[in-house]
Amino acid sequence: MRQCHDVPTRRRVPRTKITVPKPPADFVSRPRLLTVLDGASDAAMVFVGAPAGFGKTVLLAEWARRRDSGAVAWLSADADDNDDRLFWSAILEAFGRCGRIPAGNPLRRLAVPEVPSTDLAFLAQVADALDALPEPVVLVLDSAQEITSPGPWHGLRALVRHQPAGLCLAVASRREPPLPLGRARLADRLVEVGAARLRFTADEANALLATAGPAIPRDQAAELTTRTGGWPAGLRLAAASAARHGSLRDFATGRDSAVLGYLTDEVLAALTPAQRELLRTISICDEVPAGLAPVLSGRADAEAMLRELGEPATQVVDSGGTPPHHRVLPMLRTYLRAELQRRAPDRTRTLHEKAAGWFAGHDRPAPALLHSVRSGDPARVGDLLREHAVTLFLAGEHRVLRLALTLLEDRRIPADPPAALISAGLYLEAAETSAAGLQLARAEASWPERPTPELTVLRQLTYSWLAQLDHSPAQASRVAGQVDEELAAGAGLGGVATLHRAGVLIARDERGPAREALLQVLGTAERVHEDFTVAQCLTMLAGLACHDGDYRAMDTLARRAGARLPTQDPPRSLQGAQAGALLAYGALLCGEPADCLKHAKRIGQFLGDAPARAARELRLFAETLRGAAEFELGAWHAGLRRMRRARTRLGTGRTCPAGHAALCAVLEQRAALRLGAAGQARETVRWALPILAGSGELLLMRARTQLRLGRHHAASSVLRSLLDDEAPMELAWAAIEASLIGVQAALAAGARDRAARLLDEALHAAEPTGVRFPFVFAPPELIGFLTSRLGGLGAGERFAGEILAVRRRLHTPPMPAPLTERERGVLRLLPTQRSIDEIAEDLTVSPNTVKTHVRGIYAKLDVRSRREAVAIARERGLLDAEVADFSV
């Protein structure tokens, strides 16, 4: 056996090649993946396999830095490692930098023979030297796909076959290396991290995108994660693009040359010219059904090539589904499509024409219409609209319908009555009633002498929908009564006509028949995939569940409705706003103000500045919820101001929706009393009186006021009259709030037995509906009483635990001590620069009394001067609110 004698026979290796890379500037730690890798202690091998840009090197480098010093030998492979001697020289140099390898270990003095991978003696000495180590080391072979020569892999296989106890081999590669991974899997001696695990989670993506600063709004992070598929390189490129350009516009439209350069050099460079051309060709389609790729590309082997492109080594195409289809990764598709349009616009139009013809021939009207629009073919667009517009509208394909109608308008092609009515429907879904009225006028101007039944019913339904959005319930009911349901059924629009009738029934408070009608329409619409009709049914059913106090069902139905609605940018959708309003309401009632805030903000995006009465009321409903959520999250004054603005804009009188008015009044008065804004609380009650006359909510607010004034007996008396008179409640959960006010009144009177009974009743009523809001944000004395009764609550024990857990998790700051009425009166005069004596004269009190109030104001506002007090009071809205209260 030939011996290897001295170190000088090794080739020189660059230090950077055997050094663990430093983390990138936008480094995001991946603890969940590090935990997986830490499980490799008993494994023979680790394989981190994924295409380019998945963060393989960054992950292994972080893992290496976390391990004991000197426990990792690192080798960044490159083309030079196809030379067998260079490769093994680098391996031994990497081992030589390991502190765990003792000075006398043969690994530090082994020479590299001429053909090391076939030199059994050399490989045996390496294995024996590793076996002799007191503790194992990890050899990381990064970028292993660069080694294409069989020699180095032959040697590594032989080394792994020896299974030296002192070695764990970790390989990062874009493709599976020629190592015995299958055997290691069977023996449970392989730890694998693939592309699926390497994709960024939502939290990881948020952490990475935060490095771009304000250029990427937080509400866009989730959409960006979806668009990139969680691909780490894609997210990094997005963050870098936003930092360069100040927004994501260039990245999203495929115009960022740096991103295109990365995709070209790192993703497309590994493909053959034929594969790259195929990807460009099919990039015109968001989804490529089986059979379309050969038509577009003219290649009989296109399907086979796409399957290859979906393999782990490249993974630039997702294939599968029912029916089977292919999809180029969204970010890559965007850039390929933009590049094709820039370089070959005529070819792009031809490809869209081919796609439109193929989809039309396979009874896929939505993509057929979309590609007809993109090919700029108004004749085919008109034909498809005449045949399929109503079906596409009910299916929720609103985006493609808008594009088609815009094309006809741009080409100055007059819309015929069916197209004008569909256009009106699209405007009504966006709550743009003025624009819808214009389209109705266009339809009337060219109305045929003998309209088809479908056209007649479409006109009736459009007028009915317009009336529901912009007129009073009585007027809407009259117009809806003109819809001919028998004619509608014969024209295939019976379900939509029934929806309008259900709206009338709800307005008449005939909720049982309305629910039955909606469930019937829902079942049919789901069977025929009319997603927009399904969303309408679900939203209306969610509203009924809300009225009945079944808030769990309300939340479930609203989520189902939102999932059926079309996605578009901007997302103008009245249905989306209605579903979002119910989700925001449900989140508040569950004691989740942050979620309520998130949903309430989205309602504004859904509605924009749409002029419809229904849109205006929804915006104000959202503002009320948003104010309540801000209040509970600690922005007390800002939240209270927002609630007041929403209430005053809602108006007065019986035209104001009673349910909405009840919610405004109950939430605002509750917050105002808690913050000590008694004037605003009184103003709220005065506003509610004419709208909620005879309602239980008025008695509830009266009981709250009495309790706040310390008149607990009066509060209990009001609550008893609320129960005895059985005053109707607009808000089902308000009865739970009334019980908790009773608990507080009983505690103040020292009647703990009555307080315990009322608390049990409140828990019993709240648990089935999931209403935690009145408990989670209850005053400390009530929470203390609830806590003291833990262990004796019986069936309410679990729900009480949920309430306390939510309260602990929220960590809301303690509310500041409220200013007294006298302190507020003094505060109102501080900005006037009057002296203490002049303020005392205005208020007809002594100067010493004013000084006492000023000291109280300074302490409660945490200030030291009159100027600071005025500034803080204005910032918190205390002066604004008081001026308003004083003027009423």
Image: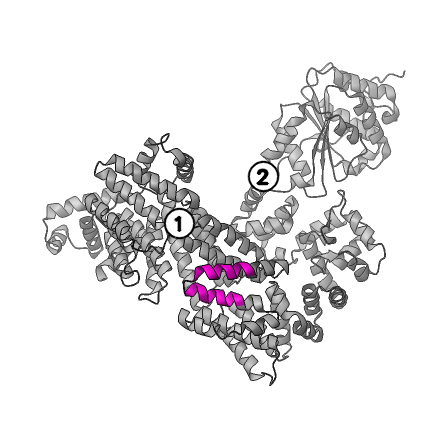
Q: Is residue 665 visible?
A: yes
State the image quarter where residue 842 is shown. Answer: bottom left
Amino acid type at image mark 2: Val
Q: Position of residue 529 (x, y in %)?
A: 63, 60
For mark 2, give the secondary structure: loop
Quarter of the image with the C terminus is: bottom left
Q: Which residue is mark 1?
A: 629
Q: Which residue is mark 2?
A: 28
**Compared to 521, does 322 lie above or below?**
above
> What scheme was used to colour the molecule?
one colour
- Please give left or right for residue 90 compared with residue 453 in the image: right
- Please give left or right for residue 754 compared with residue 445 in the image: left
- Please give left or right for residue 656 compared with residue 151 in the image: left
Please state the extent of the stretch shown in magenta in the rendering. Answer: 498-520
Q: Looking at the image, is mark 2 or mark 1 nearer the viewer?
A: 1
Q: Main secondary structure of the magenta part?
A: helix
At a point 40% along the width and 60% down the height, the residue shown is 620
State the image quarter where residue 457 is shown. Answer: bottom right
Q: Position of residue 847 (x, y in %)?
A: 11, 48
- Please give left or right for residue 506 compared with residue 415 in the image: left
